[in-house]
């Protein structure tokens, strides 16, 4: 279009239709050039804007595809978990998970309670203490067995008192 306008102006000048020194021609030519420059600026701006919109659309499309891919991966993972644990739907899986989580909390609470009652002792420490107590108890039982020969109940004491009295007479 621009080339057509330039060739038409050149043809008109060489044909003697217009005079380039005429003020009307100069104002018209400068006005035409100014309009053409404005047109070029807007056209380039429109092209840049179109490229920006196209890039934005491509980014949205790739983001949308990535989201759909992630959703599909999540769906497959959920179906795999549901098949593995043999649950019919997500709500059942959620309730079972909550039950196990509650059981785990209770187990951890009981473990902490038992560990605090042990006073920081390990199983080896407790086993050593049990062995010591068992050994001490065996010694005490041996001593009690030896002393049991000298222990009498009330009836035996009465019989002995009667026997001693009889022997003294």
Image (cartoon, rainbow, N blue to C red):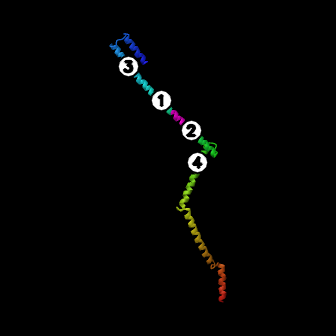
In front: mark 3 or mark 4?
3
Q: Earlier in the sequence, mark 3 or mark 4?
A: 3
- Say whether residue 167 is left or right of residue 32: right
Secondary structure of the residue carrying tag 3 is: helix
Q: Mark 3 or 1 closer to N-term? A: 3
Q: In this picture, is 152 found above or below 76?
A: below
Determine the residue positioned at 58% across, 50% down.
102
Q: Classify 104 as above or below 156.
A: above
The majority secondary structure of the magenta stretch comes to helix
Residue 99 x/y as whole percent: 60, 49
Neighbor class of circle 1 (other Cα within 10 Å; few <14, some 14-19, many 20+) is: few
Label located before the other in sequence (4 or 2): 2
Q: Nearer the viewer, mark 3 or mark 1?
A: 3
Decide which of tag 3 and tag 2 comes sooner along the chain: 3
Q: Nearer the viewer, residue 6 or 147?
A: 6
Tell me the crowding category of disc 4: few under 14, some 14 to 19, or many 20 or more residues within 10 angstroms, Cα based: few
Q: Position of residue 158 (x, y in %)?
A: 65, 81
Q: Which residues are magenta?
A: 60-68
- Judge whether 13 appears above or below 167 on screen: above
Task: State which quarter of the image contains the C terminus.
Answer: bottom right
- In three-dimensional space, the C-alpha distance between marks 4 and 2, rounded to whole angstroms, equals 24 Å
Name the residue carrying label 4: 98
The residue at the point 56 percent across, 54 percent down is: 108
């Amino acid at each position: 279009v621009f080339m057509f306008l330039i060739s038409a102006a050149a043809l008109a000048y060489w044909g003697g239709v217009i005079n380039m020194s005429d003020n009307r021609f100069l104002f018209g030519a400068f006005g035409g050039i100014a309009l053409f420059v404005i047109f070029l600026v807007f056209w380039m701006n429109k092209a840049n804007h179109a490229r920006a919109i196209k890039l934005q659309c491509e980014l949205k499309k790739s983001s949308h595809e990535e989201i759909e891919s992630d959703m599909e991966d999540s769906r497959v993972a959920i179906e795999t978990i549901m098949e593995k644990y043999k649950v019919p739907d997500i709500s059942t899986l959620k309730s079972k998970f909550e039950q196990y989580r509650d059981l785990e909390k209770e187990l951890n609470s009981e473990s902490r309670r038992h560990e605090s009652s042990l006073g920081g002792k390990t199983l080896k420490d407790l086993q050593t203490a049990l062995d010591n107590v068992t050994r001490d108890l065996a010694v005490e039982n041996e001593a009690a067995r030896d002393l049991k020969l000298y222990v009498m109940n009330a009836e035996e004491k009465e019989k002995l008192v009667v026997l001693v009295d009889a022997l003294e007479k």
